Amino acid sequence: MKTAARFDHYRVLPGAKLDLSKIDQEGDGKLDKDDAKALFEEERASIIASQEKLYAEGKQSLLIVLQAMDAGGKDGTIEDVFRGVNPQGCRVSSFKVPTAEELAHDFLWRVHAQAPGKGQITIFNRSHYEDVLVVRVKNIVPESVWRPRYALINDFERLLATSGTRVLKFFLHISKKEQKKRFESRLADENDRWKWSPGDLVERALWDRYEEAYEGALGECSTEAAPWYVIPADKKWLRNAMVAHLVAAMLRDMDPRFPPPLPDLGRVKIPD
């Protein structure tokens, strides 16, 4: 993938021993707010134009994976970056606690069914990575079960790639301080209180264990075919600009084209 070099230093190298504490959640300061907003609007327009060609061409597809701590900005990223994209060619799939039917199959069964078809963009709001994150942090399954899943995930994403689906994965990296601020904002806003759950505090208490699990998953599962990016996410305007830029760059690299018109269309007469 020929992504723009601008944010390549946020790409996780294959097999990297990641230390999230060394990645500033506010970014590196190289992009100010005005420039970031200008970049965001430019790249959002590019995404809209490219998605129309992708849908019309019907030969390639794009899978975008979003993972984050609670209140990390997954919903906001989807709403902001993909605003204006034709919903006929773009779908969001969210993965909650597995149902009884899903638990009766392998852990990738429910995920594969949601992968994008030709001409489609699909965004995973949480994903198959929950099966090496939550299950690890909460000891739902032993390490002998979750650790081999890294290789299975890499095989799955390689299968998608060889079948014409590009894969981009974003970890929205917020600080514990910012999470607290966003939780407090939810509690203060009557329109946002529905998002609050007492379980959020249970998950927050496991912050260090989740960071360790993310470091393992991102390092083991960032590949050439399906790279992970750690996106500084304390500043929403920076998060949006970076994600939009990387998605737009991927679509430019895919270079979708409108199908050629049928021959002799100039002779077509539309009857009264």
Image: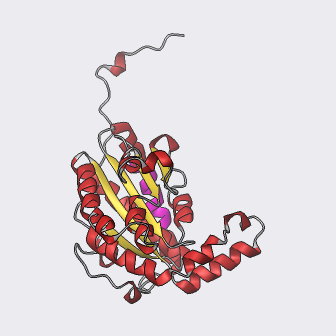
Q: Is 43 positioned to the left or the right of 160 in the image?
A: right
Task: Residue at the far bottom: name it.
Answer: 22
Image position of 91 with respect to 249: above or below: above
User: For residue 117: magenta?
Assistant: no
Image position of 150 with respect to 6: above or below: above
Residue 11 coordinates in the image, percent (x, y)? 31, 74
Query: Which of these two is toward me, 244 or 43?
Result: 244
Image position of 69 with respect to 66: above or below: below
Q: Quadrant location of residue 188?
A: bottom right
Query: Which of these two is toward me, 128 or 122?
Result: 128
Q: Quadrant location of residue 39?
A: bottom left
Q: Which quarter of the rendering shows the N terminus? A: bottom left
For the point 63% across and 77% down, the residue is: 182
Q: Is 46 positioned to the left or the right of 201 in the image?
A: left
Residue 34 coordinates in the image, percent (x, y)? 53, 77
Q: Is residue 246 visible?
A: no
Query: Which of these two is toward me, 270 or 45?
Result: 45
For the point 50% across and 44% down, the residue is: 86
Residue 254 coordinates in the image, percent (x, y)? 28, 52
Q: Tell me the chief SS of the magenta region.
A: helix
Q: Which quarter of the rendering shows the C terminus? A: top right
For the point 24% across and 50% down, the residue is: 159
* Magenta extent: 40-50
Q: Is residue 126 visible?
A: yes
Residue 142 coordinates in the image, percent (x, y)? 35, 69
For the point 62% across and 71% down, the residue is: 199
User: For residue 41: magenta?
Assistant: yes
